[in-house]
Amino acid sequence: MAHLYLLQNHLEPAPAATPIAIDQPVVEVLSSQEITEARFLSPDMQESLRSISTVENTYLDVFPHCLIGSFAVPDKEHVLSDPLCFAFYLDATHLVFLDDGTTCVRILDTIASYHIVKKPTVAHCLFEFMKLLVKNDLAFLADLEDRMEDVEEAIIDRGMDASTRTMLTFRRKLLRIDTYYQQLVDMASGIAENENKLLTHEESRLFLVLERQAERLLKRSLTLKEYSLQLRELYQTQIDLQQNNTMQFFTVITTLFAPLTLLTSWFGMNFANMPGLDWRWGYETIIVVSAIIVVIEIIIFKRKKWL
């Protein structure tokens, strides 16, 4: 179902059949089937919007009289699932979103209910729309960092509670988020350049602000991506330490019983003239000597901190 919003003193929802003056700034949300209702769009432009609306890419294209672009917004609840994809068209009096989901309507309803748009222009509405897309992203990244810190503490305190899959999941999430922010920076920069002179100077400055905000988010995501690599290295270090401890344990055990092996090997040869074989207390003596050797070795190993 098509959704129509009028820009007067602020953004206001209106019935889809509302008559619109030629110079009236409007915002519309249309599905891929409803895009033909936008009579001011040429068939080629309609087809272009259809084709980019499902592309998992945040993208901008500049034409002499308009801007078109697409968004691929990661779902913060399920970052590794399919992104929220939609397209937009912007000219002097029209802002059209092509969205088969509910993302655009939800954001525009928020803008309308809080009267966020102070200037009745479609470019300003697009700015507020993009700003709401990243509104809670710092909190999202902070929460992701907290979970990574919990994993780090688990690795340090409890050794092997984390898994390689956990490390890879963090890295895949951050790669996807990093790509999104990089593309968002490029989009905001492209709009701010105002190559086709579609925006006023004030509107261009708004998108410069948005570009800087996206850059800060990009830097934060890059920092977290580096942190995920450090977590992977820490996890691998813990695995190596555990393997070293295991090898050290078996080495100590082997060393501990090496003298006993030598002792029993001597007496196991059973030479006829070997002293002690016919002695009444020979067996008990060997046991006592072996025990003394083990005790002495344990004391030495303790002092060397090998045990």
Image: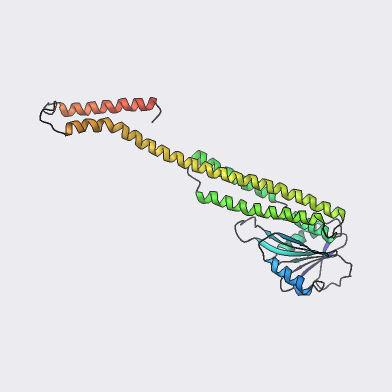
Question: In percent of the image, x 24 and y 28: which residue is there?
Answer: 290
The image quarter in which residue 108 lies: bottom right
Q: Position of residue 248 (x, y in %)?
A: 38, 35
Residue 32 falls left or right of residue 271: right
Quadrant for the C terminus in the image? top left
Please tell me which residue lies in front, 45 or 220. 45
Residue at (77, 53) in percent of width and height:
189
Q: Residue at x 58, y 50 (%)?
A: 171
Closer to us: 292 or 64? 64
Residue 200 in view (yes/no): yes
Which image quarter is the N terminus in?
bottom right
Number of residue marks: 0
Q: Is residue 18 above or below residue 251?
A: below
- Does residue 138 lie above or below 31 as drawn? above
| Rendered image quadrant of residue 41 | bottom right
What percent of the width, then of the height, locates residue 220? 67, 46
Tell me if 225 is positioned left or right of 69 in this view. left
Residue 154 in view of the camera:
no
Residue 63 on image: x %, y %? 80, 64
* Residue drawn at point x = 54 percent, y = 40 percent: 153
Which percent across, then down, holds residue 258?
28, 32
Q: How is the image coloured?
A: rainbow
